[in-house]
Image (cartoon, coloured by chain):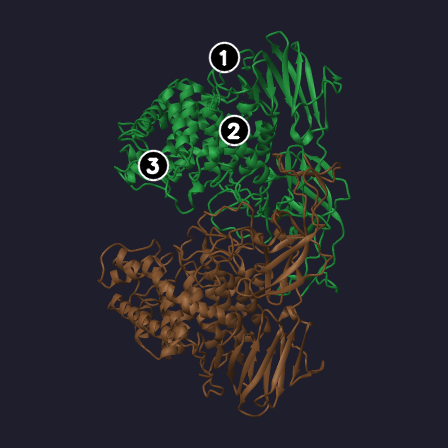
Chain colours: A brown, B green
Amino acid sequence: MEAQPTSASPVSAGPLALTAGARTVLRPAAAARITGGLWEARRTANAHRSIPGGYDRLEEAGNLHNLRLAAGEADGEYAGDLPFMDSDVHKWLEAAAWQLGDPGTTAATSAELTGRIAELAGLLARAQQSDGYLQTHFQVRKPGVRFEELDWGHELYCAGHLIQAAVAHARTTGGSELLDVARRFADHIDERFGTGENRIDGICGHPEIETALVELYRCTGERRHLDRARWFVDRRGHGLLPEGRFGSRYWQDHVPVREADAVAGHSVRQLYLLAGVVDVYAETGDRTLLETAERLWEEMGATRTYLTGGVGSHHKDEAFGDPYELPPERAYTETCAAIASVMFGWRLLLATGRARYADHLERVLFNGFLSGVSLDGERYVYVNPLQVRDGHERDDGDHTAFRTRWFRCACCPPNVMRLLASLPHYMAAADGEGLVLHQYATGTYASDGIAVRVSTDYPWRGRVEVSITETAGGDRPLTLRVPHWARGRWSVSVAGEPLGPDEARDEDGWLRLRRRWQPGDTVVLDLDLAPRLTTPPERADAVRGCVAVERGPLVYCVEQVDQPAGTRLEDLRLDTGHALTSEERPGLLGGTVTVGATAHTAAPGSSTSWWPYGRYGESGERTGEAPGEPFEMTAVPYHLWAHREHGPMRVWIPVDGSRSDAVRD
Amino acid sequence: MEAQPTSASPVSAGPLALTAGARTVLRPAAAARITGGLWEARRTANAHRSIPGGYDRLEEAGNLHNLRLAAGEADGEYAGDLPFMDSDVHKWLEAAAWQLGDPGTTAATSAELTGRIAELAGLLARAQQSDGYLQTHFQVRKPGVRFEELDWGHELYCAGHLIQAAVAHARTTGGSELLDVARRFADHIDERFGTGENRIDGICGHPEIETALVELYRCTGERRHLDRARWFVDRRGHGLLPEGRFGSRYWQDHVPVREADAVAGHSVRQLYLLAGVVDVYAETGDRTLLETAERLWEEMGATRTYLTGGVGSHHKDEAFGDPYELPPERAYTETCAAIASVMFGWRLLLATGRARYADHLERVLFNGFLSGVSLDGERYVYVNPLQVRDGHERDDGDHTAFRTRWFRCACCPPNVMRLLASLPHYMAAADGEGLVLHQYATGTYASDGIAVRVSTDYPWRGRVEVSITETAGGDRPLTLRVPHWARGRWSVSVAGEPLGPDEARDEDGWLRLRRRWQPGDTVVLDLDLAPRLTTPPERADAVRGCVAVERGPLVYCVEQVDQPAGTRLEDLRLDTGHALTSEERPGLLGGTVTVGATAHTAAPGSSTSWWPYGRYGESGERTGEAPGEPFEMTAVPYHLWAHREHGPMRVWIPVDGSRSDAVRD
């Protein structure tokens, strides 16, 4: 089945179905399908391994058992020690629903997922209480307690994920079984919360319901859900939540949303909230919300984002750090935070039409997000550090540095599944006149009178070929994004003719080609993927004197396993005077491109002294070994780390000249 | 009252009273008293402000209420949400008891403390159960539950602190009220624990009882307490504790003690355990324990110790990081970990007689420990970072970067009190022939046939004058330590005559002066306190390209408040080509010495771009401001930080040449 080229309706069947009156510059493309390349391979693994396996994990971990308990269909104790066990089920349902919406899904998988969804929708309906309330933790463990522990209870958070699953299911199948459950819960919440008499003036410790309620409004047309979303946004930052263990910043209750200067607290909470903030803007036109969202996004990018696009420097409270506090080995950079960042950035892209949000989206997708799931779709990381040290201790409870099938707190795996299952919707947009290709993946995309086929080996190769397959006639723009890392290093041709500087000019990142397009027309964008060295921000102390290797949109890392025997990553120094090389390696890690660089190992200083600090500039010889001979260092894409061994890894590599001449005591 | 110069008994009245058969190279000096200088001022604040105030805090926080509940003398709920609330009382009692042992304590303070101790000893006795058990958390909240939650229950930990308080009280006053309570609990523990039938084969999640039981053995002569301490050491690392949230390393149960290669897990737990390990060695002669302790100490110093001597890189689990994982802004470096490190290092110093342990002791005492309490003794920090950023967020629950009167988890304040109250004992030792001065503070010290008076303005000035006040006759060594930072930069004279190189030679840090000493003889040690720049270990990525300022034993820091207006610490760069200066500032921070250096501010790079990473070596101009003019940067001793404002601070300062030339996108 082909994508429909000239859909009469501007409404996408994806995660964001803006209303006709929404105040956004762009909209998701009406049709988008990924049919080849990196994302297709990952999405196939997601469909065939992650999602089916996820159902089994939910059974094993007791999430389904909890629902059966609430439905009166099982005996025993609530499984798991977290109150939001239900949300894993909801996120899995959302992933399965998006997968059903993909025309490439095999019949067998469709049948299996359809059956599972029906089964779980029935179970949820039976577990739901007569007034619409549904959260097994409170129903089973604390019957009668409701919305009294808003700080850690996660009831509205779970409701939000239920709503998102239901909307996805309704959009891709037209079915109402899940939507009925979600609407009953949403109606109940709307009746209970508010500033009036006998209402709960409270917010959830974990934002999520805001974005979900806006989507429920978009799906059902019921305005009260949009109003309630806005109300939840408005009530945040007024101290309705207790201080808690980590302070009110943790759940963004320290300042009213519109007054915030910077992202703060728990990264996923902050970014889900901001996704909702943009959604409320889009449907209400409240520009103070959009301004807040743009301000916080910019502050986050400029001061608190790792090179991989990952965010969150603190393990303790899974929170943003201070500005420029970006320690690579203590990067928490939770997979869920990358996903939340994609959701937030995508909404800003649509709201504003600014290419920088698409640049950011690409960076997060290919690096900080993609590292969160293994090539085979079977294993995940929760934490995505930019360095793993020689001697790293593994059992600190974060599962840093090795891939795991499931987690005690299993928020990440089903979150990965739902993003991959809905990913085509994140690739292209429309501006009312024509199609906007802001991400590059082989597939078919259509909206606003243009349908195209994209063929590319991106991100491995820089050539992106776009063929027009259908048009609705007339002069229309086809807009391509020139990634920010490629500015000045690209060319474009139409029908084999290179465009001159007048036409091939990117305006703030967009290459806007207006033509009377005909089927068969071909546009080729060539991006220079020569590997490059990247420097950190001057204030990012933790990686001072280091560079990173990047190639196209990919951040690279060095893993111990690829280096000559005896090379210790701790002592690796990159020689910047030599050119970088790249090599296509079809047999490595599912097919990848490695980057080579000249490096040597530094004298590590004495390792026998008890005191490793030295006196600056003192004459005398350094103890320890002499620097080693230059050798070829091999880097692999960061998202492929930890696939071969649990060894040391680093993204940032010191360069010579970064140390002081010193002797040791 | 003067110290007794030639005590017949080698037994110190301090925290370590080695038995006559103990296998140590040194012993604590028989008498030690600090009468002037920095430590005297801090100890006066401790006696007059911290300790009396601490009693009030224990009342306010409910620790005493909990004891009254257990004694049946109050109604209500258990106060506080931690099971080890009792231990704060015990540590306070230990501090008060040591204070009573100081001849400089005023009569009024002595009377007040004596009364408080009597009151609390009575309360503890009434709260104690008939079989000796005593922990209010379990008695009040979980009656009947005992030693069943060894992972988090802290029962043996509290017992340990009770024992240490009781021993201190018995030693300084001869009183038995507290000792009777402690012995009943220790006897109960000895009866309940063990490998035999009907015994509990278990260990406490928080080591502490090991060192306490050895001291109880030393105090009472009851061998079974030493045996039980050894048994607790031996049983550790065999998986008796569950994995827990943070893995078994957290409580050092991942490997048998003697097989450990490196310190691991929660820093305070690890170091209390190792203090006990050395204690068990000292009284049993089991050299495998001493070898383990030395090996782990060396590994800790070489790879996991901050310049301040602080340890613990992880906030999340208050744990050691990986080797060389020493991020300055995320240094957890809990005050209690510094104290535990002092206790451990002091024991190794005595056990081995190696000067490096005294060097380490000095570093921790003057820096990582002393920063934990304010000059006036009224406020504390729990976390001692080496950097506080511009824009630091304060409410993450750690109270980083500002001084606080008390904490929800109030382990640090009474721990500071007990160390300061017993500090004179940590200053001097004896080697069987004569006196060993391994720390320098104005006061009187005596042991093994030599009594001296030390006069010095150390650490502000480098001159240490030692006058012999009494001797027992004969040839005796007076041993001084040449600090490791002063090697090659010192001189010594006896009776005004400089010693030549033959005699003034430090052997592994010790300057051993053997003479037929006469009262009136004077030895003057001159240490060069010229300020110096220090470089980090080559593998410590987080501070690459930086230097720190040190002067004598003191680590320095720069605080925002001392720099020219408009200077942003984030952008400070030290010019290494200029000499450092120092200035005595009697009016600043209780009297201190500041260090001046030439610095400038670096171009911070663009702060308007959303993406702060740049392309290495690309031609073009850097955005942002030009580097500023050189100015005089002022550094203050690290231990005095956060006394004037809650502003930015840093120990490590980048030097020029540490960055790559780069442009920003």
Total numbered badges shown on the rendered structure: 3
Q: Amino acid at mark 3?
A: His
Q: Which chain's residue wears label 1?
A: B
Compare residues B310 and A498 and report the one nearer the observer: A498
**Separation of residues labelled 3 and 1 (CA atoms):** 41 Å
x, y percent for residue A322? 56, 54
In the picture of the structure, the residue carrying the numbered disc 3 is: B65
x, y percent for residue A292? 53, 67
Q: Earlier in the sequence, mark 3 or mark 2?
A: 3
In the rendered image, is residue B65 in sight? Answer: yes
Compare residues B169 and A321 and report the one nearer the observer: A321
Provide the secondary structure element on which disc 3 rests. helix
Compare residues A506 and B638 and report the one nearer the observer: A506
x, y percent for residue A495? 64, 86
Q: Which chain's residue wears label 2?
A: B
Instruction: Give above or below for B211 relative to A245.
Output: above
In the rendered view, does A174 fall on the left or right side of A535? left
Q: Amino acid at mark 2?
A: Glu
Q: Earlier in the sequence, mark 3 or mark 1?
A: 1
Instruction: Give above or below for A419 relative to B501.
Output: below
In the rendered image, is residue A296 in sight? Answer: no
In which image quadrant can residue B154 be found? top left
In the picture of the structure, the residue carrying the numbered disc 1 is: B9
Dots 1, 2 in contact, CB < 8 A: no
